[in-house]
Structures are given as C-alpha cells and as structure tokens.
Amino acid sequence: MTRLLRVTPSGAAGLAFAAFAFLAIPLLAGKLWLSVFTSTACFAMACSGVAFMYARLGMVSLTQVGLMGVGGWVMLRLNHAYALPFEINLIVAGLVTMVFGWLLALPALRLRGLYLALVTLMAAGGLEIIFATFQFPNGGEGFWGVKTGSAGAFRRPALAQSAEAYFRYTVALVTAGFLLIEFHRRLKPGRAWALIRRSEAAAMSAGVNVTLYKTWAFGIAGLLAGVSGAMLAGSLGLLDDATFRASESIMLFALAVVGGARYWLGVVIAATLYRILPALLNNWGVDADLSFVIFGAGLLHAVITAPDGIAGQLGDLLRRVVRRPSKDTPEDRPKDAPA
Amino acid sequence: MTEIANVTVRFGGVVALNDVSASFTQPVSGIIGPNGAGKTTLMNVLSGFVRVTSGSVSQDGTDFLRLAPHRRARWGLRRSFQREEIAGDLTVFDNVLVQADNAPGGDRAAEVSEMLAHVGLADRADKMGRDLNSFERRLTDIAKCMVGTPRLIMFDEPGGGLSVDETKQLGALILSIRDKTGAQVLVIDHDVELIRAICSETLVLDFGRRIAFGPTADVLADPKVKAAYLGTEEVTP
Ligand SMILES: Nc1ncnc2c1ncn2[C@@H]1O[C@H](COP(=O)(O)OP(=O)(O)O)[C@@H](O)[C@H]1O
Ligand SMILES: [Mg+2]
C-alpha cells in the first residue's frame, strides 16, 4: 500500500503542475486560448495512452487519434439521442472505445515492431475513411445522426457549464488518467509489462499471461483515447473529421517520442507541441505547416541523440544541477514518472 | 521425477534432438554436451517454446506438452535463460515478485524477501535491474526461480561468465534448492566442472543424440563422452 501511494519527486512535480493548470490557467487565459488549452489537455490524455504503450511495453500504436474520434462520435451520438447526463455519456464513450482498443489488440497479439505499427496505422486509415464518409453526429436523424445546417445543442456537465469550469474538469480527468497508468505501473500489471518488454519468453516463463496483459494495455490506451475524444467533443460541441486523420495519430506518437514517452512531462510537452505550437505560429502570422519541419527536426534529434526525449534531457540537466551523490535510489530518477 | 521419452525436434533439415530419452530422479541433475548439442532446445521443449516433432515429456506424471508456457510456470516450472532476462526498469524485488505474482501462494512479499535473503541479495532488493552486475543478475534469477512453490527448476548455463569463486557459491545455492523449496533441479552446462560438483546424475547430448546417461562420475568416465569433448577447450578430466 505504501508502495502504491508513495509520491516520487517527479510525481510531486506532476501533481503541482496539474494544480497550477487547474487554478491558474483559467484566470490567465482568454476565451480563445482557454479552448486551445482544453484541447491540449484532451490530447495529453490520449497521448499518455500511446506513450505508456511505447515506454512500458515497446508497442507502437498509430491509431490513438482515430480512437479519440470513436470516443467523440459516441459522445455526440448519445448527447443528441438521449437526455442522459454528460458523465454517463462519458463513461459509455470510454468503454466503447476500450472495446475498440481490444479489437485492435487481436492482430497485435501476433505481431510486433513494424508490423504492429502498420496494422494499427491501417486501422487508423479505416477510421479516417468512416469519419470522412459519415461525419460526426450533430443532432440529425438515423444511426449516423447527421443533418445539414446548424448543430444541435451540446449539454456540458452540470459541474462544468462555463469554459473555465470545463477546462478544470478536463484537467482533473487528465490527472486521473495519468494516475490510472501510474497505479497500474506500480502493481502486478506494471511488473508484467516490464518483463514483457524485456522478453516475452522470460515473461511467459514467469507465468505472465502475455496475451492478457497486452490486451489490457490496449484497453487502457483505448479508454484514455475514448474519454479524451469525448471531452474534446464537449469542449467544441461538434467534431470535424479532419481532426482524426491517420496522419494525426502518427504525429501524436512521434511527438510522444520527441517529448519523452516515459515521463508525464514528456506527454505534456508532446501535447503542447501538437496543439499549442501551431496555434502560436498562426498567431504570429507564420504558416502553421512550419510546425511539421520543427517536429521532424525534433524527431531526428530524439532518435539520434535523446532516446528519452526532451523530458529525459531536462531530467538529466536537473540532476546535474541538484546533485545528490550520496543517494542512488530509484527515487532520484524521474523514470518513476507516470506514463 | 522428470520423464523425457523419445523426444525428437527438427528445425527444417536440422535434427536438434534425435530420439532422446532420460528419466531424472535426483534432486539435482545435469545435462551437458558441446555447443550446439541440443541442450537449450531440450529446455525450450520443457518450457513450451519449441514443439516436439515426436515424443513426450512429463513431470511426476503430469503431461507437460499440453500446457501453454505461462500455465507451465503456474504449475511450478521455472527456468533461467542463457542470457539472463532481468527487467532493467524493475527493482530486484519486483523482478522476483513477477514470478510470485503469477503463482498460487499466500504472502508473496514475504516469500520474495525470504528468497532474496537466501541468495544473499537482501540488501540489494531495491536496486534497479539495470544497475546489477552479472553475478547479482544470476542470483536474482535463482531467487526468482525459487518463489511460488516451484516443482521443476531448469538453469541454462548458470555458470557462464562467472569467476571460480562465484561459480562455487552458485553451486552451493543450487544444491540448497531442494531442501528450501522441494523442487527438482536440472542444470545445463557445457562446462563439466559445475556439473561434476553438484549433479548426481547427468545426461550427455552430442549432435542431438543421447550418448550417455547415469551417475555423473560414471558418465564423465565414459570414453564416448571424452571423445565428444575431445579437441574442445572445455576438456578437463
Ligand atoms: N529456433 C531454431 N531454429 C533453427 N535451428 C535451431 C533453433 N534453435 C536451435 N537450433 C539448432 O539446433 C541445434 C541445437 O541448438 P541448442 O539447443 O541451442 O544447442 P546448445 O544449447 O546445446 O548449445 C543447433 O544446431 C542450433 O543451430
Ligand atoms: Mg545453449
């Protein structure tokens, strides 16, 4: 129990950052930027799913943003079809997407490395086509629920009607998502994942049901994608299929590597680069496509010189500054960080 | 008792094991043979990573080959790998706990602590796997094999890369396993010294065939065994 609840320095920093975001950002940011920050938080949650699959199991999943689309679709569909509370819709959206994650796991259990990445990319391509063909529900009739003209109303949570409250609601959920991963990591599944990443044969010899634990990981990533997609739907009130293209999933994964997939900070950096950099460039009147060039350079940098990403480098830097040579316990390492 | 009956394994054209039979009854038994003799393949058959072309294997009457690899572990099969597989981002304690996690049993943490103390790693339980030296890795492997009520433990070249002193310590530990856990032990090596020191009976493989089986001293005195080792650097008798 003490093991489970122990707060590492990196974990404390993460919680402090979440508290800062929760309290300060709604006070500081204007309406437009608050919406950008809310969607950044949503993408951070989705990104934590791919980052953890990559960092803990060595699995590359390129469907995450597509799965967000699934969660968003379910959320919008339920919102317009029934008068259920937001929270119920959110849970259903998360669970449905988790099931999609499991479906994705079926081929994944037989494939690794590049082949796995290709299969998940094909799934993302399939979702892209479906979203482009049928669009997202906006209050219309029938199963797909699409109509022309203005969209129906979106009901936000009773707790979070305003943009400020909705941002805080999102930050709380993102933090819960990070903690979900971190608790798993500290318990039986985390140990099983660590051994699976080292060697599947060794894991099997240790009695680990490799199929079960890989499926479980896909389920968690799916759940996080579903909830984040649903939150994004709630933030905007409607969704556009262009948000969930397969290329976006590739981008989010690449940025998780650039940011540092092992660390909560890496995920935050990834989501910030993904959402805020293009918005900033736009603000400055620079073509937002320049961000692709910057991301490409970042990825090269990560692959060639910084396998632990930007967050890993910052951690190293911090350790060099605040040197504590007498202790060599794992607590000193921000590697204990969530995600 | 471990019964290996007429086991044949083919990889395409290579016959890695050719109609091998042996029944191990001693607490600690050995399997030796030059490199490429088929020792690891035999262990992989027992683990479930390699399918037999024909033949059967059972432990105390249980037919192994029906079970999936992780089920064999739950049932009580343990093994180490030639190149030990310790997760670098888990502590020593957690590396051992994984095995206990997936075995029937009561207080897992207490059992892990007990076995770590037994192998002499009590003070290094919180060390990360990536920070261990090769001997500490071996010891972690042994502790891992001992938790969760094992029935059959197999070590693949456990003495590889260790100093003479470390190998002695390792041998003593392996000999203590039966009393500590009740499990039967199979030790694979191509170096006969460790085997001579700790195994009461030994199977000798060469090119996938059984060339001798019986009490270790008799087996090592066998001219056929000497011939198999002739010209290889491991020769000593
Ligand atoms: N997975 C495999 N595929 C093809 N050939 C293999 C495989 N595993 C082992 N072999 C071959 O089987 C023979 C026995 O190998 P192995 O059991 O590893 O020997 P040992 O452990 O005694 O050194 C060798 O010729 C090896 O090349
Ligand atoms: Mg071998």
Image (cartoon, coloured by chain):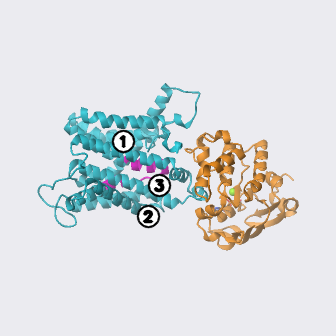
Chain colours: A cyan, B orange
Disc 2 within 8 angstroms of ligand 1 (CB): no
Tell whether position A63 is magenta. Answer: yes
Main SS type for the magenta part? helix
Q: Amino acid at mark 3?
A: Gly
Q: Residue at x 39, y 63 (%)?
A: A103
Which range of residues does the magenta coloring cover? A47-68
Q: Secondary structure at mark 1?
A: helix
Q: Secondary structure at mark 3?
A: helix
Residue of label 2: A106
Q: Position of residue A83 (x, y in %)?
A: 21, 59
The mark lying in front, picked from 2 and 3, is: 2
Chain for mark 2?
A
Asked where in the image residue B3 lies, by quadrant, the reply is bottom right
Q: Quarter of the picture for ligand 2?
A: bottom right
Q: Amino acid at mark 1?
A: Ala
Q: Position of residue A39 (x, y in %)?
A: 27, 44
Q: Secondary structure at mark 2?
A: helix
Left or right: B120 in relation to A229? right
Q: Residues within 10 Å of mark 2 (few under 14, many from 20)?
A: some
Q: Amino acid at mark 2?
A: Leu
Chain for mark 1?
A
